[in-house]
């Protein structure tokens, strides 16, 4: 077992032992609500820290990225370095593929064909993407380029301009302002509008927000059914989260005042009808805009605390599912809200991976996950090859949808 995995097991065991009393409601010392909220977050974190080495790769990345950005803790770097190496391999393949006639349409068809269809929501998204040609591939490429930018890897990609130019050629304005797309996938529409701006491709943020208001006018919100109401909330939270470069920087409360005002006005409905995932993201919108003192935040923290299953140590799904992998998105958001330290850490910068690629011998690697990433590296990015032994999908399109 890798040293990092052993550290996680050790840390997780003593944390779980320390917090079991709280989970069982057996505390003997009177504590404040704030202390209870933090203890709840630490209890969930202890469970996930112990299980992290065994989680699927996309869940490891999603969890480690968020915990690193609120803590700066170097424990999470091995998972993020593994993700960085994977990104380089994926981007090298896709950028080289853009030189081949028909590559992008073929990749788009492949992505759509592999899109999950377990739920009605997934089937609707798959059908929607099928109608938009190369957008399915463009969304994935945009996500990966944005992740590379977060890690300080984008400038080191020798053919990045080709990828950016390709993305600039797609019909983003029509896609991001289409009412049916908005009704199906408001969160990803928000993400993509901000990603395109942050990568300097095109600024469609205002047009996207205007389209959002057209689909979800304020006067009609009271009549929205559960699915539409949840989609609207997700879209609003992701505007703030994407603007923060996913928990790397503070964002303007003034710019997003319409979102914060709506959340404040609707807090009773949010607490009554929204899932814990959405509730946590609503709280994060307040936290990222420097509004930790807003009355909505402790109310959501209390609701998340009450949602923890004492036996499982995590927040289960609305159906009572306590599977750690399936519940990772919901629970890592809860950890962030409940243990919020009031500081953000950018990155991490992984530009050193380019230098390591020139120095690491075959079959070795710094910070790699044991048995999962086996670099076979000669020199430079053009020659970088990573052989990935997958027991789980690393990143699928649905993983991207939830992970971001």
Image (cartoon, helix red, strand yellow):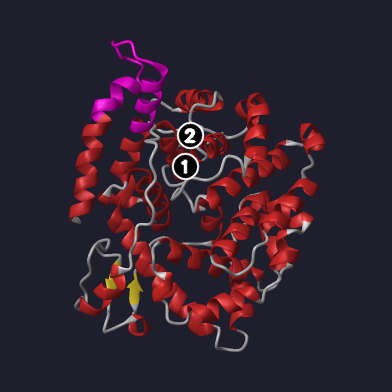
Image quarter where the N terminus lies is bottom left
Real-space Cα distance between discs 1 and 2? 7 Å
Whether residue 113 can be seen here = no
| SS for dot 2 | loop
Write the residue at 70% across / 41% down: 227
Give coordinates of residue 139: x percent, y percent.
59, 66
Q: Specify which label sits upstream in the sequence, 1 or 2.
A: 2
Q: Is residue 255 left or right of residue 378?
A: right
Identify the image quadrant of residue 180: bottom right
- Pointer 2 residue: 316
Check if residue 20 falls in the magenta segment. Answer: yes
Residue that carries the numbered disc 1 in the rendered image: 327
Write the start and end of the magenta stretch as one range: 17-42
Residue 157 higher or lower than 38, as above or below: below
Q: In x, y percent, where is residue 206?
A: 70, 55
Mark 2: few, some, or many residues within 10 Å (few <14, many ≥20)?
many
User: Camera-side residue: 171 or 96?
Assistant: 171
């Amino acid at each position: 077992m890798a040293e990092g995995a052993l550290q996680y097991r050790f840390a997780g065991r003593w944390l779980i032992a320390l917090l079991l009393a709280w989970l069982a409601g057996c505390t003997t010392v009177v504590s404040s609500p704030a202390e209870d909220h933090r203890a709840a977050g630490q209890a969930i974190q202890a469970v996930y820290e112990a299980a992290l080495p065994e989680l699927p790769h996309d869940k490891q990345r999603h969890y480690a990225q968020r915990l690193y950005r609120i803590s700066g803790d170097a424990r999470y770097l091995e998972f993020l370095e593994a993700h960085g190496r994977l990104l380089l391999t994926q981007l090298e393949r896709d950028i080289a593929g853009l030189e081949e006639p028909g590559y992008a349409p073929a990749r788009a068809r492949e992505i759509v064909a592999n899109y999950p269809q377990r739920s009605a929501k997934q089937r609707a998204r798959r059908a929607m993407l099928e109608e938009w040609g190369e957008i399915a591939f463009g969304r994935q490429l945009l996500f990966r380029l944005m992740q590379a930018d977060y890690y300080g890897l984008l400038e080191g990609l020798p053919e990045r301009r080709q990828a950016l130019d390709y993305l600039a050629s797609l019909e983003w304005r029509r896609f991001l302002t289409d009412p049916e797309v908005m009704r199906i996938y408001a969160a990803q529409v928000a993400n993509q509008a901000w990603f395109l701006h942050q990568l300097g491709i095109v600024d469609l943020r205002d047009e996207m927000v205007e389209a959002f208001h057209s689909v979800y006018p304020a006067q009609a919100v009271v009549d929205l059914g559960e699915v539409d109401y949840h989609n609207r909330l997700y879209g609003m939270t992701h505007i703030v989260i994407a603007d923060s470069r996913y928990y790397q920087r503070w964002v303007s409360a003034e710019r997003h005042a319409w979102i914060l005002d709506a959340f404040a006005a609707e807090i009773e409905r949010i607490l009554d009808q929204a899932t814990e995932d959405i509730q946590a993201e609503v709280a994060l919108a307040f936290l990222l805009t420097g509004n930790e003192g807003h009355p909505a935040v402790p109310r959501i923290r209390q609701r998340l605390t009450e949602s923890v299953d004492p036996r499982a140590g995590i927040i289960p799904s609305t159906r009572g599912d306590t599977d750690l992998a399936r519940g990772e998105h919901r629970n890592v958001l809860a950890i962030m809200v409940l243990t919020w330290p009031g500081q953000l850490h950018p990155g991490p910068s992984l530009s050193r991976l380019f230098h390591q690629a020139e120095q690491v011998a075959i079959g070795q690697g710094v910070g790699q996950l044991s048995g999962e990433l086996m670099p076979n590296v000669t020199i430079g990015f053009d020659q970088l090859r990573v052989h990935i032994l997958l027991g789980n999908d690393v990143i699928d399109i649905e993983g991207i949808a939830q992970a971001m």
